[in-house]
Image (tube, rainbow, N blue to C red):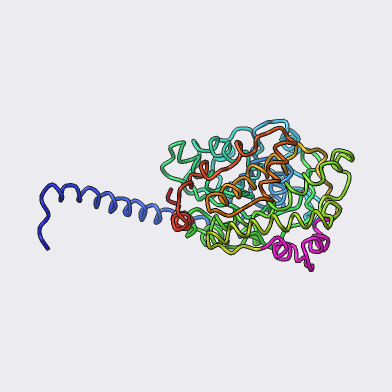
Amino acid sequence: MAELPASEEIMKTPQEGTVKMKRKITKASDVRRAQYIRSHLQKDPKELIFCVLGAGHGGLAMAGHLAIKGFNVNLYNRGRKRIRTVIQRKGIKVEGEVKGFGKIELASTNIQECLKGADVLMVVVPSVAHRFIAQTCAPFLKEHQIVVLNPGRTGGALEFFNTLKQYGLKRFPFISEAQTFLYASRALGPAHAKIFSVKNTVPLATLPAYWIPGVLKVINRAFPQFIPGDNIFKTSFENIGAVFHPALTILNAGWIEETHGDFEYYIQGTSDSVAQILEKLDKERLDIAAALGIKVMSAKAWLYTAYSATGKDLREAINANPGYFGIKAPDRLHHRYVDEDVPMSLVPLASLGKMLKVETPTINAIIHLASVMRGVDFWEKGRTVEKLGIDGMSIKEIRLLAVTGEL
């Protein structure tokens, strides 16, 4: 081979050096992070400290359940009003499928106090608040900590990662997202939660994907229901709330406004006609995933996996799910099933569909109707591919992102 001219050699050397340095940094980071996982697993399970972020119905249920199991639990909420009674009673009463009183070690609006010493951060807030939580936690996050978005909805882990990156973090915690929320639950009071049912299995994925086994070993010490998800795109595409919540709420808008939600949301709200629309919306979700080469469960298959509910069609499977009995509809349209699930679940699906040239007329229609009803431009507010940092990426690059975590 002919020798390179000096000028070309100078141009080549820094580039090669940068690649080698990047590989060296990545390897060193992976060695550290593997040690963090080992350290978590060497602890007695009851020595693990969980911080639940969010004191809504889901946060109360999860914090109470963890405490009943004997784990150390801190509870963070942005406003003091929601946690005042938890502070006074020093815990949370839980009833339903899980029963007991869970002692909370610390309930506070001080994020630094709540995160100090925490091993696992269970983020249980509406996904519209994921960016806020990332910004609030960023100054105090440690590399050994595990963050779980419960659930991520569609693109949650990506948004959390991008927010921390924009904040200037150099060493990231383990970032993961659950496909769906572990419970069907409601808050019965400021320190009182009812867990109607606990799902059989909930897939969980990390960014990057190769940390899934290690993170799961830690999380499974508290919740054996979490199982491996393939990657964060699969958990995002299997966000079944995108199928059920917005469309079911919009299509029952008159009934909700007339009765203030005094009917069984899933059982009575899913008529034959409504079920047909849900099935069409679900098909569009499956088509978008297929365009990326990702095989995801249909809503009907998910009902069987999560609740052992079966049926010849979606409506019959919903009616066969005991976990849905007794769950009332929202009492108003200004509700997370619209204000959260449209911009954080449907908009990213439609935006990805547009980028991949997959038609999504049913999804688009629900987004449009929701925007008109609420007087909000959910397209503008939602998680588009531009906001997730994947616009212009090829299918190959998106798949690689799921594994490497490199943006």
- For residue 268, above or below residue 88: below
Q: Is residue 263 left or right of residue 90?
A: right
Q: Quadrant of residue 46?
A: bottom right
* Residue 8 horizontal/vertical position (percent): 15, 49
Is 322 within the magenta?
Answer: yes
Dominant SS in magenta = helix
Q: Position of residue 330 (x, y in %)?
A: 80, 42
Residue 79 location, x and y as percent?
67, 31
Q: Position of residue 22 (x, y in %)?
A: 32, 51
Q: Is residue 126 magenta?
A: no
Furthest-top residue in view? Answer: 80
Q: Between residue 175 and residue 242, name the one nearer to us.
A: 242
User: What residue is shown at x 45% (from left), y 41% (from top)?
Assistant: 165
Which quadrant: the N terminus? bottom left
Position of 312 relative to 21 (above/below): below
Residue at the (73%, 65%) spot, across then down: 304
Task: Give, as a single range, the part of the protein colored magenta.
Answer: 298-325
